[in-house]
Image (spheres, grey):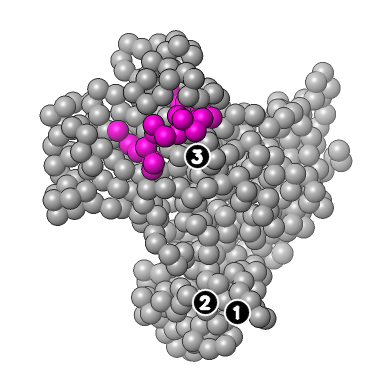
C-alpha cells in the first residue's frame, strides 16, 4: 500500500465498505483496513429501509443486494393478556422512494456484495487482517500506525473515517466518550433456519410479545430465516442462556429442535449511546463507533449507512472548493438525527420491556385508547425523523430536511427511477416538472408531495435531503445564488 491516502476507512463491515465505495466513486484515493479477514458468517443486522436501498441503487450495488432481501411484514404487538395493542407497519403503495419501505435481509451475502463492490471500485485499496494500533494528527494530515501480523507500518491520510464498531479503537484513542440515553437491558438474539413444518407453527407476520414475564420479539427474515429476540430475566446467566438446550426451552412455545437449525444464539446488552463528538480534527466517527441503539424498529445499520452517505458528499465538496466548515455539519446533523431516533426507539423499547403486570396493563389500555379503542397502526417511516438542524436553507418550512421522494418516471418507452434519470449531485425540481412531460410520473408520488407541502420548487442535496424550498422564481434564484 502507498504511504499517503486521501481517506483511510477503519473497519470494513457494511458501513466501512459503503464509505470506501462512495469515496472511491467520488474520486478519492481510499485505503480501507479491517482486523478481520472474512465476512462474519452469521447474521447480525437484519433490517434495511428504502432510504438505504436508494443509496445502494445510486452506488450501483442494489441489484446484488435485492436477492438477499424480503419485505418486512407488519409487526403485531401483543399485550400483557395476549391482546393486540399496536401494529407497526410500512407506508402503503405507491412507495415514496421507489423501493419497498422496509426490508429484512441476510447480512453475510449482503456484506460480501458490499465488500466486493468496494474492492472493484477504482482508487480503493483494501487491506484485511490489518488493524490500527496508533493514531495522531496535525493540521495537515492524520498519521496511522497499522499492524498486519507481526509487521507494523505507517501511513498518512488527509482524513480518517472510523467505522470500527462499538469498541472502536479510534474513538477510544481520541478519548471521545458517549452520552448515555439510559437504556441497558440484557437480551438473547436467536437466529434459525426453519423447516416447512416449523414455519407452519410460527406467526405469519412479525410479532412483539410485550408480556411482563418475558418480552420476546419475533422477526420474519428472508426465506426460512427467522429471528427471536428474548429478554433475559434478572439472575439469568447470559452465557448459559445462549447454550443450545436453554435456547430450545425458551422456544418451546413455538418450535421443537427438529423444526429448525440453530444458526446463531448470542447474548447482548441493548444500549442507547451517542458519541459526544463525531469529528475530531480530520477524523470522523461513523456507524457503531458513533452510536448504538436498541433494535426495536431495525434502524441500527441504517443509521450507520446514513452517516457515511452524509459524510462522503461533504468530503468531496470541500475537496472541490466548498468551505471547510461544511464538514462541521456532519456531526451536527447526524448526532441530532441519531439522538432523536434513538430516543423514539428507546420509548418503544421501554413499553415493550415493561415487567410490572399492572403497569403493562395500563400501557395496553393507553395504546388502545390512542387507537380509539382498537390497536393503533404506526408506520416505521413516521418514526424516523427528518434532519432537524445543520446544512439547510434558513427559510423555515416543514419540507426542509425531509427526503425528497423518488418516483418512477417515463424513460423512453418504459419507466425508471428518478435518480437514475437525473443522476446524483445537487438537483432542482419544480412542481411543474411533474405535471409536464419533463418527468412524466407513473403514480403521481412527486406531484402529491409538492401539493402536500404547498411549494413550487425544491433544491435537493446529493444525499436526497431537501436543502431549500421556493414558491416563486425570484426565491429560487436567490437560494441558488
Q: Where is residue 39 in the image (x, y as percent from the top left)?
A: 68, 32
Is residue 337 placed above or below 173 in the rendered structure?
A: below
Residue at the spot x=82%, y=53% of the render? 122
Report if residue 205 lies within the magenta region. yes
Q: In this view, does 234 lie to the left or right of 463?
A: left
- Image quarter for residue 428? bottom right
Marks 3/1: CA–CA distance: 33 Å
Q: Mark 2 points at which residue?
A: 442
> Could you tell which of marks 1 and 2 lies nearer the N-terminus?
1
* Residue 411 in the image, given as x and y percentages of width and height: 64, 78
Q: Nearer the viewer, residue 252 or 428?
A: 252
Q: Residue 221 carries which label?
A: 3
Q: In this view, does 236 lie to the left or right of 109?
A: left
Q: Are marks 1 and 2 in contact (CB under 8 Å)?
A: yes
Closer to the camera, 32 or 408? 408
At 53% from the left and 41% from the top, the residue drawn is: 222
Residue drawn at (44%, 83%) of the image: 456
- Label 1: which secondary element: strand
Is residue 9 inside the magenta stretch?
no
The residue indicated by pointer 1 is 410
* Neighbour tally class for label 2: few under 14, some 14-19, many 20 plus, Cα within 10 Å: some
Residue 210, quarter of picture: top left
Amino acid at each position: 500500500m502507498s504511504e499517503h491516502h486521501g481517506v483511510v476507512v477503519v473497519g470494513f463491515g457494511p458501513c466501512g465498505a459503503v464509505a470506501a465505495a462512495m469515496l472511491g466513486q467520488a474520486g478519492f484515493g481510499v485505503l480501507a483496513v479491517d482486523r478481520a479477514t472474512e465476512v462474519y458468517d452469521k447474521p447480525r443486522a437484519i433490517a434495511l429501509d428504502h432510504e438505504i436501498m436508494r443509496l445502494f441503487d445510486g452506488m450501483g450495488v442494489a441489484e446484488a443486494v435485492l436477492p438477499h432481501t424480503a419485505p418486512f411484514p407488519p409487526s403485531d404487538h401483543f399485550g400483557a393478556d395476549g391482546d393486540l395493542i399496536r401494529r407497526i407497519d410500512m407506508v402503503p403503495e405507491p412507495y415514496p422512494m421507489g423501493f419497498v419501505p422496509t426490508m429484512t435481509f441476510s447480512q453475510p451475502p449482503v456484506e460480501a456484495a458490499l465488500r466486493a463492490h468496494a474492492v472493484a471500485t477504482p482508487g480503493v485499496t483494501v487491506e484485511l487482517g490489518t488493524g490500527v494500533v496508533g493514531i495522531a494528527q496535525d493540521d495537515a494530515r492524520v498519521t496511522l500506525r497499522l499492524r498486519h501480523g507481526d509487521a507494523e507500518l505507517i501511513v498518512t491520510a488527509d482524513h480518517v473515517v472510523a467505522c470500527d464498531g462499538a469498541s472502536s479503537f479510534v474513538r477510544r484513542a481520541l478519548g471521545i466518550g458517549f452520552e448515555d440515553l439510559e437504556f441497558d437491558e440484557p437480551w438473547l438474539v436467536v437466529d434459525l433456519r426453519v423447516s416447512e413444518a416449523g414455519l407452519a407453527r410460527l406467526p405469519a407476520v412479525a410479532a412483539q410479545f410485550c408480556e411482563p414475564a418475558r418480552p420476546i420479539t419475533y422477526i420474519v427474515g428472508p426465506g426460512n430465516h427467522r429471528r427471536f429476540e428474548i429478554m433475559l430475566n434478572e439472575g439469568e446467566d447470559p452465557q448459559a442462556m445462549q447454550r443450545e438446550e436453554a435456547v430450545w426451552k425458551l422456544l418451546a412455545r413455538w418450535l421443537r429442535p427438529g423444526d429448525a437449525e440453530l444458526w446463531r444464539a448470542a447474548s447482548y446488552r441493548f444500549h442507547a449511546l451517542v458519541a459526544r463528538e463525531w469529528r475530531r480534527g480530520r477524523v470522523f466517527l461513523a456507524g457503531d463507533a458513533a452510536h448504538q441503539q436498541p433494535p426495536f424498529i431495525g434502524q441500527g445499520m441504517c443509521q450507520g449507512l446514513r452517516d457515511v452517505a452524509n459524510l462522503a458528499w461533504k468530503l468531496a465538496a470541500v475537496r472541490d472548493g466548498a468551505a471547510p466548515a461544511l464538514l462541521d455539519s456532519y456531526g451536527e446533523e447526524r448526532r441530532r438525527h441519531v439522538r432523536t431516533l434513538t430516543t423514539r426507539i428507546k420509548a418503544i423499547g421501554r413499553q415493550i420491556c415493561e415487567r410490572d403486570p399492572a403497569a403493562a396493563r395500563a400501557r395496553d389500555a393507553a395504546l388502545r385508547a390512542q387507537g380509539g379503542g382498537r390497536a393503533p397502526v404506526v408506520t416505521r417511516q413516521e418514526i424516523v425523523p427528518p434532519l432537524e438542524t445543520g446544512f439547510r436553507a434558513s427559510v423555515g418550512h416543514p419540507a426542509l430536511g425531509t427526503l425528497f421522494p423518488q418516483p418512477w418516471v417515463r424513460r423512453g418507452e418504459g419507466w425508471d427511477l428518478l435518480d437514475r434519470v437525473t443522476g446524483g449531485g445537487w438537483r432542482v425540481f419544480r412542481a411543474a416538472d411533474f405535471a409536464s412531460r419533463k418527468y412524466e410520473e407513473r403514480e403521481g408520488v412527486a406531484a402529491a408531495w409538492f401539493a402536500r407541502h404547498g411549494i413550487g420548487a425544491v433544491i435537493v442535496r446529493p444525499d436526497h435531503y431537501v436543502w431549500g424550498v421556493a414558491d416563486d422564481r425570484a426565491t429560487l434564484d436567490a437560494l441558488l445564488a
